[in-house]
Amino acid sequence: MIILLNVVLSLLGIGNFLKNKTMKKFVYGKDDALFGHIEEQQDGKPFGNVLDAGSGSHSLRWIATLEGKGMTSFTAVTADKNMQLRIMDEAQNLGVLVEENHIVVGNWFG
């Protein structure tokens, strides 16, 4: 039954879509110029506590990859309550919404 489902999904082109969507769940430094540069500057040292000022889904998907690079916690700051709720939902889905991590609303610019 599962094989038949995979064949049908492949014929419809849905299988690759689902696979690509899952693969894009995380953003890795090697795939992003800014995050790659930050990782390069870190030079293998643990990330420790990370501050993400102006946070959004894209940066959160990168932050979710940093646990294996010595990140102990993060604070994500966004200026919009709706974005905070969206990021909190995304963090829950990525498995990084834990007590040590914070997603807050604030004016990080001023």
Image (spheres, helix red, strand yellow):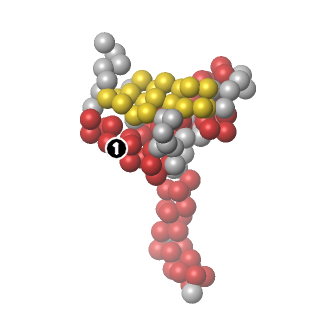
Image vertical order of residue 45 relative to residue 1, above or below:
above
Q: Quadrant of residue 86?
A: top left
Residue under the image location 46 percent in, 29 percent down: 75
Q: Is residue 45 left or right of residue 108?
A: right
In the image, 32 versus 97, the foreground residue is 97
Q: Which quadrant is the C terminus positioned in?
A: top left
Image coordinates for residue 36, horizontal then vertical, percent? 61, 29
Residue under the image location 34 percent in, 15 percent down: 109
Please, what is the three-letter code of the amino acid marked with disc 1? Arg
Q: Quadrant of residue 79?
A: top left
Image coordinates for residue 102, horizontal then vertical, percent? 43, 33
Report the residue that reaches farthest toward the left: 81
Residue under the image location 42 percent in, 40 percent down: 57
User: Helix or strand or loop: what does disc 1 sit on?
Assistant: helix
The number of numbered discs placed on residues in the rendered structure image is 1
Report the residue that reaches farthest toward the right: 44
Report the residue that reaches farthest toward the front: 99
Residue under the image location 33 percent in, 37 percent down: 84
Which residue bears the numbered disc 1?
86
Image coordinates for residue 31, horizontal then vertical, percent? 59, 38
Task: Confirm whether residue 40 shows in the render.
Answer: no
Q: Is residue 48 left or right of residue 94?
A: right
Other-residue count near label 1 (Cα within 10 Å), few / some / many at <14 / 14–19 / ≥20 = some
Image coordinates for residue 40, horizontal then vertical, percent? 67, 24
Image vertical order of residue 41 relative to residue 18, above or below:
above
Report the residue that reaches farthest toward the top: 110
Task: Confirm whether residue 107 shows in the render.
Answer: yes
Image vertical order of residue 45 relative to residue 84, above or below:
above
Q: Which quadrant is the N terminus positioned in?
A: bottom right
